[in-house]
Amino acid sequence: MTVKECKVQLEYTPDLVSVPITYRLARDLGLEINILKAAIDENGGKMILFLKGEERIVAEGLRSLEKARVRVKPLGDYVVKDDARCIDCGGCVSLCPMSAYVMSLDDYKVRLDQSKCVACGMCIDSCPRGAIALNQ
Amino acid sequence: MLVTKSYEEINSKIEKGEAVVLTAEEVIHVVEEMGVEKAAKEIDVVTTGTFGAMCSSGAFINFGHSEPPIKMQKVWLNDVPAYTGLAAVDAYIGATEVREYGGISYGGAHVIEDLVAGKDVALRAKAYGTDCYPLKDIQTSINLTNVNQAYLYNPRNMYQNYAVATNSSEKTLHTYMGKLLPRNGNATYCSAGQLSPLLNDPQLRTIGLGTKIFLGGGVGYVTWEGTQYKTNVKTVNDVPAGAARCLAVSGDLRGMDPEFVKALYFPQYGTSLGLGIGVPIPILDEQVLKATCIRDDQIFAPVLDYAEQSRARKPVKLVNYQELRSGAIDINGKEVRTSGLSSYSKARTIAGKLKSWIEKGEFGLTKPVACFPAEQVQKTLEIREVKK
Ligand code: SF4
Ligand code: SF4
């Protein structure tokens, strides 16, 4: 059995807002899910999910979402850190709610762990070197 | 027997390539193992380093005379105003001066960074025209190779220690200590701690007027006491637990390395210069050596609440640099995450570079020409009645 972890962005039309899509993934397929971000407006809903489970089941879950007319996009890197501009000051470290920026206590360099990022945007205007930017 | 060494003895060892040099991090372990007495005989120099936002920085530039000549009463470098109340074609570009148009994210610090990086900078000047300086307007471009002089003169750098910033209010604050999240959401600090130059020689026994230093990757000198230099600060473990001494430094922009001269922009606050400085400490005796063994867990800084907009903020508590560097401190029972604003990794690189310069005999030590005040109080500005 291969375990797969992934982050996906879901987009769905207003009529699907009342459907408990994430609940089904957990109950029917037994996937481990974590809702990183959820927003609803007049255009429908948008959600960022962290999924973990057997590779086959994760794929099945994503297919079932698509069948239910949910648009599924794998979430790439939301922010990028330009290491050539970064001076390892650590300014960003305490601002990220997910502790995605980590200052190593060995070499005192700051690294961004993309797997922890939930695309909140808090870090964007925190870097005095302009080393952090949205990944366009 | 007390060990004593003179500057001359240390320098002659440096010249012969025989000096024993350690960084302020390395010395801690060596002295722990060897003991102070033996180590004081062995070690000749301890190198320190710091890299952080040094707002009180700027550069004097002499542009040379145009044909016909101009007095340059007003000067802009890449649209950032420079001060010109000096002799003709001299100007001072300050790191925190921001450009006149196009927002506060580009300032004097960026002009200095561009110059050190070897880039061309646009020069615009205006004057009222005199019999000896007839020209009234000029537009041209300059770089480090075509100006006469370009040197940093920074009135207040290398603070001995600095307070930690946090924010108890309900809204985010944008300060020179970075973004401070509401309800003590984070805390920021700004010192290289155990690597910091003035914490390794807290009474400034070996650092004074004329001390040769590593400045921005090149060579510089200590040129005066820093503005706001003060000594009446509470000490813990013989080092000030808060901002105390600081120094004025100067050095040629030519020969500096872009790696250690970096413009900074704090959103909604403005610009500052990220600058690397390293100071060598000659191990004249055991006392000097002992002071260089200070560790992060022995250096304390007060936590100040920036929600209180007053010069007389009462410290919330004292914390040490080991706690600060661990990533979180405790404030009123809450775990508050910390961010350093000074780069410890760069501070290490600087102490290491300076060490290798000295080991190779490329960098000799200087005995201070004069010492800075042993006691000095910082005055405040009162709002007084203006007598006509
Ligand atoms: S705030 Fe910017 S310069 Fe400082 S560590 Fe983070 S990314 Fe690097
Ligand atoms: S976008 Fe948010 S979660 Fe992602 S790294 Fe920045 S602060 Fe952290």
Image: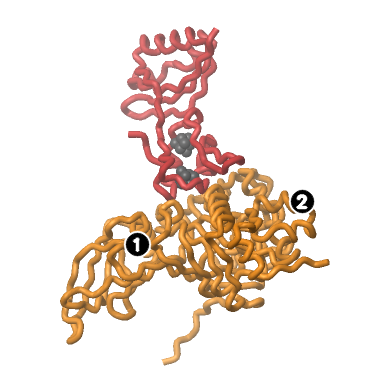
Labels 1 and 2 positioned on one and the same chain: yes
Disc number placed over residue B32 in the picture, else none: 2
Residue at 56% over, 53% down: B356
The mark lying in front, picked from 1 and 2, is 2
Secondary structure of the residue carrying tag 1 is: loop
Residue at 36% over, 57% down: B110
Disc number placed over residue B98 in the picture, else none: 1
Where residue B223 appears, as percent x and y from the top left, is 51, 73
Disc number placed over residue B288 in the picture, else none: none
What's the residue type where badge 2 is placed?
A: Glu
Q: Quadrant of the N terminus of chain B?
A: bottom right
Q: Which chain is red?
A: A
In terms of depth relative to the viewer, which is nearer, B356 or B338? B356
Tell me, yes or no, if residue B179 can be seen here: yes
Q: Give the quadrant of residue B20.
A: bottom right
Where residue B131 appears, as percent x and y from the top left, is 17, 87
Count of marks, rendered view: 2
Q: Which chain is orange?
A: B
What's the residue type where badge 1 is placed?
A: Val
